[in-house]
Image (cartoon, helix red, strand yellow):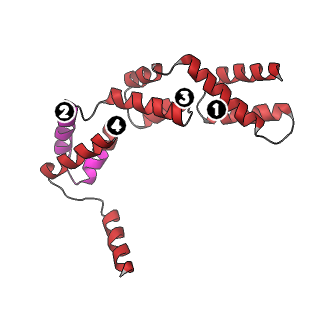
Amino acid sequence: MLGYIFFDICKVMTNSNLNLTPKQAIPKIKQFCAYQERCHKEVKDKLYHFGLNTNEVEHIITTLIEENYLNETRFATQYTLGKYRIKHWGRNKIKYQLQHKQISPYNINKALKSIDADEYYSILKKEAFKHFHHQAKGIKALKQQKTTLYLLQKGFEIDLIKDVLIEMSKKS
């Protein structure tokens, strides 16, 4: 019995087109957008997954924008602040991820400006200090290099990383 249920779940998950009509898709996509902020790319992908054609998708996207279910500026700002405050990502990584989600450069720049510079620098210092001091004892230059690579991977700017490491070396 359990095997049949698992088979049915797998069958539903692998069925790429649900073949919904636009009338059936609109309430589902509104709920999808109301649950959390979505970018246009995510919504389009979901609508194509429902089996809709390009004209139907564009019409539904327009409707969602008019009814304020979709707002690219709002999405970019929420995404930026969430990744910055929760995951402690730097501006570079956030910018790259927003570009990957096909957000316009105007909205990316507007969202990145919503990050407070002083708070950003203090988070960078906290991340640098944490990573530097959690490494095994060793050569200070090697620890600084590893910390730099870690912070670059997190998306922080190299000039700010250098400033923080110089500040840390003066204190120790």
Q: Report crowding for label 1: few under 14, some 14 to 19, many 20 or more residues within 10 A (C-alpha).
A: some
According to the image, label 2 marks what residue? Answer: 67
Q: In the rendered structure, find residue 92 and report the number of the disc placed on it.
A: 3
Q: Which residues are magenta?
A: 45-65
**Residue 78 appears at what percent x and percent y?**
40, 31
Q: Earlier in the sequence, mark 3 or mark 4?
A: 4
Cα gap from disc 3 to disc 4, whole angstroms: 21 Å
Identify the residue at horizontal 71%, vertical 36% (top origin). 131
Q: Earlier in the sequence, mark 4 or mark 2?
A: 4
Q: Earlier in the sequence, mark 2 or mark 1?
A: 2
Q: Secondary structure at mark 1?
A: helix
- The kind of secondary structure the magenta stretch mainly shows is helix
Q: Report crowding for label 3: few under 14, some 14 to 19, many 20 or more residues within 10 A (C-alpha).
A: some
Relative placement, left or right, of 134 versus 63 is right
Say what amino acid the circle numbered 3 marks.
Asn
According to the image, label 1 marks what residue? Answer: 152
